[in-house]
Amino acid sequence: MQHPSMTLRLNNITDPFTILWLTDIHLCECDERNREVSDHMKERKAIFGGNSKERFLSVMEESNLDNISFVAITGDTIDAPTEANIEQFNAVWDNMKVPCGFCFGNHEWHGVSPERREYWYPRFNASQSHSLDIHWFDIHGVRLVFVDDSDYQITQWQLQEAEKALAGQMPCLFFMHIPLYLDSLKEDTIEKWGEPLLLGANCWSDGARERCEVADDSESTFAFRRLMLEHKNVKALFAGHIHLQHKDEFQPGCFQHVLPDSGSCLVKIENSSSNSAAFKCSLTHEA
């Protein structure tokens, strides 16, 4: 399978490595246990090309190849928390041979009652070893931080944990479902969705938050956005949600990367040379 590829060059990493990043697969499996949404799931499956399961299984099988050191999943792997979808996700998760980080998207907890994240967290085997609110991995001198922003909010506790993750000198890559609001991403997002479906956006139209069931942004949400925009250890952001391909600079030389639905990408981490910039990024397509 062909994947886009990007290279991030960071100072002082101990070894180069490759991350397989995927987002917004939207598994639409359903059986008699969720008859109330079976017709809806059939419609959704057609929207995503009818092959989301096959693509998911194929990509995750590739993750076990020797050149992949880590798998990063930024939410909406399933389209709704049906029993069949959760079973499929857990079966793949339990057979992973490399470390894997995962954050919830809004579809991990919407579409089947009750629509509460806290109810669905324990149903995902990924929650057994890490808090799905926020967790991180250190690999070859780089910290990979996974944050659940699937309700468009960052709690005070998540903010405090993000500050802990950023303490010290280690370069940090943040993986989230909903992209950070950036002026350069606003126009294309509104053109596609009618509203700025982004974290920390303050330009929703009248009544739109209520229609979309999105609460007013908390102070901790705004503080998290400022932290990402200002902290020297934040080197890249990775997100999905808006089903667009986008690359936007949020600090000098540092970019937020957004993939479309069924998106995947090889993120190659390399050590920058002593006479190069601390962080560089390029995006190419490789077979």
Image: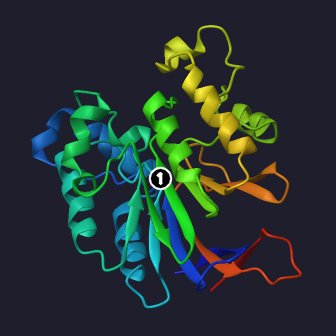
Front residue of 22/82: it is 22
Q: Measuring 34% from the left and 43% from the top, which residue is drawn there? A: 108
Which image quadrant is residue 56 in?
bottom left
Q: Measuring 51% from the left and 14% from the top, which residue is drawn there? A: 211
Q: Circle 1 — which element?
A: strand
Residue 183 at x, y percent in the picture = 80, 35
CA neighbours of label 1 inside 10 A, class few (<14), some (14 to 19), many (20+): many
The outermost residue toward the bottom is 66
Residue 122 at x, y percent in the picture = 20, 45
Front residue of 134/196: it is 134
- Can residue 156 be seen? yes
| Placement of 25 over or under 139, stated as above or below | above
Q: Measuring 19% from the left and 52% from the top, which residue is drawn there? A: 84
The outermost residue toward the left is 33
| Placement of 228 over or under 252, stated as above or below | above
Residue 69 at x, y percent in the picture = 46, 80
Which image quadrant is residue 9 in?
bottom right
User: How many numbered circles does the render carry?
Assistant: 1
Q: Name the side, left or right, on which 5 lies relative to 17.
A: right
Q: Amino acid at mark 1?
A: Phe
Q: Name the side, left or right, on which 237 lies relative to 31.
A: right
Screen quadrant of the C terminus = bottom right
Residue 257 at x, y percent in the picture = 67, 56
Residue corresponding to mark 1: 146
Q: Name the side, left or right, on which 277 lies relative to 245.
A: right
